[in-house]
Amino acid sequence: MASAPRPERVLRLLAGCLPPYPPPPPTVGLLSMEQQETYLELYLDQCAAQDDLAPPRSPLCNPVVPYGMYILNASNPDTAFNSNPEVKETSGDFSSVDLSFLPDEVTQENKDQPVISSRHETEENSESQSPQSRLPSPSEQDIGLGLNSSSLSNSHSQLHPGDTDSVQPSPEKPNSDSLSLAPITPMTPMTPVSECCGIVPQLQNIVSTVNLACKLDLKKIALHAKNAEYNPKRFAAVIMRIREPRTTALIFSSGKMVCTGAKSEEQSRLAARKYARVVQKLGFPARFLDFKIQNMVGSCDVRFPIRLEGLVLTHQQFSSYEPELFPGLIYRMVKPRIVLLIFVSGKVVLTGAKERSEIYEAFENIYPILKGFKKA
Amino acid sequence: MPGRGRCPDCGSTELVEDSHYSQSQLVCSDCGCVVTEGVLTTTFSDEGNLREVTYSRSTGEDEQVSRSQQRGLRRVRDLCRVLQLPPTFEETAVAYYQQAYRHSGIRAARLQKKEVLVGCCVLITCRQHNWPLTMGAICTLLYADLDVFSSIYMQIVKLLGLDVPSLCLAELVKTYCSSFKLFQASPSVPAKYVEDKEKMLSRTLQLVELANETWLVTGRHPLPVITAATFLAWQSLQPADRLSCSLARFCKLANVDLPYPASSRLQELLAVLLRMAEQLAWLRVLRLDKRSVVKHIGDLLQHRHSLVRLAFRDGTAEVETRGKEPPAWGQGQREGEVGNNSLGLPQGKRPASPALLLPPCMLKPPKRICPAPPVSTVTGDENISDSEIEQYLRTPQEVRDFQRAQAARQAATSVPNPP
């Protein structure tokens, strides 16, 4: 069974796709932030069980979300608040949470309703109340999610699977999860939690540009800098290299610069700053404006051979496989907009990303597809 | 005659059809004005009298086909005729060319690109009808570079949003094999080398299917595999006389170019056949090698499905489990032999344990171990020390030396012939 990427699951959840999904068991029950996040993750994993072919989407891009949230909540107002005296109020600190995407009513009502996992569906009460189907027992894929099982035991009594459809707004970030991304997407953390056998694409190359904002004399730069080469007949820019981080820069006379070869965004920025310093030391009033990462390339190995002919048949609209021209299959993923080169040995190259998360997301999307072609 | 219109001069309706020097004319019987005159009329009002209208006055002017487009369309038709394609292909290819021409990028492209575009349209048409035309063949016909062809082909497929199916391997085998000149004796082809076309075709097809199943075709150019398969098929049909003939000589005899990768495909195919032979008891005792196995290709192909199943085990599960311990990677492929010998039984009495069924690129040990890159703690905002930057700058003395050296080099090159 393929596990769907998490942002997409959150999206489906919020967009109110009721029929295929088990309704999230809520509770007035207010758990600690860690527990809420844990239950959210557990719940979402069961959604994955019924979610084989869902297309990946980012919750950021779905304008339907607020409306969907409202619908979900409004449909079951009576079951919104479950009476469970054992539940304790959460002291949930919502100050860091950005709920602006939600309509006001939903924000007020739903703030305190975590999504509960059906792992605790064995618990008493609500089973009779719930008209919806039982949640399937969660798969064992949660291992990679780093769940803290001890926190689950506390709230057994609070869990009422299938009670209502009111959905926990996912932005309730746990404190432990220090994300620098917008709270709307807590499911795409910077450290990739890859649910596919722990394979994480490694970044191989970052291309960035920066504007030094001054006209440069390339001949002078080539004369005074040891690490520069300049051949105006071949190319109209100075090619400069530094050793740490090991990168190459193309410096144009307009003051624009391209920096390539770094293995991470920070390294690329540091390298670009070093080039700017070299240019400064050569006597030009160089500044450091508009640093932007233009392209990121990552690669990884799924470790099994792939039938490229089969893949091009089933995913014709995205794939291009011409063995007469190139041994790999070129897969143009739409969301995120990444180009993947897939080879028969199982090696995958991902390129065209502006953000690291796009590479991780693209790999999470392609992995279930590739697994489908494992057996010849 | 009534109903044929009015005379433009006098407006009478009495128009008579008459012939003047075998040219039919409509003449007004009142004033004698010639109303229509075959194809020699020029005014737009003539159209009402069933007279021809010039192109410049018709609406065809707006859809005028430019000369270069006309040339391109002619080239498409010519190419289809040279390749002896069915007539329906011609119309489809022409339609694709016209469709491509509507895009401004194509209209403004260089002539070389438009020429290659002709080949692309024909290729797409053939692919969609499962006609086995290779890109190499088109490039040879157009005297085009494969790189140029490749870029334009990818561009046009994306531009037109076309669904181009893969090259049909079975059809390619039939066409390619038929091009081998081995089916009739000739001065260059001795009698013992002549082969029956049907037998060779069917055996080649079986060998290509075997190659496909054992990961020898995926990701590779299809033609060298077929060349190797044809060679093996031909050899195996009369091994006694033909084992002495090499692949290169075979292609020369058959008047077919030998693609460079064909010899390595041949070795891979022979390795697969040897593994399969290990599973047949009466072949195991023979201790076959790459040359002697050719004699038994017929038997091996007959039972190829079960032999492949026996000889190879699924490599995918193995690779994944072993993937966790990279150091053990290189030893996996030797497991077959090791397992055999360790049991102490004489080789040949037991079938070899199944080898991994993986593409050859996964079976070879990795060229270099790629260590995981160290986790970098760079923040991008560190201080950059002056000394670090200084190391990249030339000292004034070095600058002077460099300039002197450059000047000397300029002087040397500017003197054309040293005395």
Image (cartoon, coloured by chain):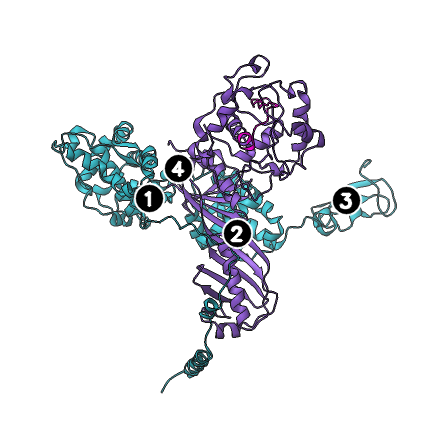
At a point 45% along the width and 59% down the height, the residue shown is A245
For label 1, the SS is: helix
Distance in Å between CA atoms under marks 4 and 2? 27 Å
For label 2, the SS is: strand
CB within 8 Å, label 1 to label 3: no
Amino acid type, callout 4: Ile
Mark 3, Cα crowd under 10 Å, few <14 / some 14-19 / many 20+, is: some
Q: Which dot marks residue A295? A: 2
CB within 8 Å, label 4 to label 2: no
Q: Note whether residue A345 is visible.
A: yes
Distance in Å between CA atoms under marks 1 and 3? 72 Å
Q: Which shade is chain A?
A: purple
Give the extent of the magenta segment: A19-36
First in residue order: circle 1 vs circle 3: 3
The residue under label 3 is B47
Distance in Å between CA atoms under marks 4 and 1? 12 Å
Distance in Å between CA atoms under marks 2 and 3? 63 Å
Are the residues under badges 2 and 3 in a single subunit? no
The chain containing the residue under callout 2 comes to A
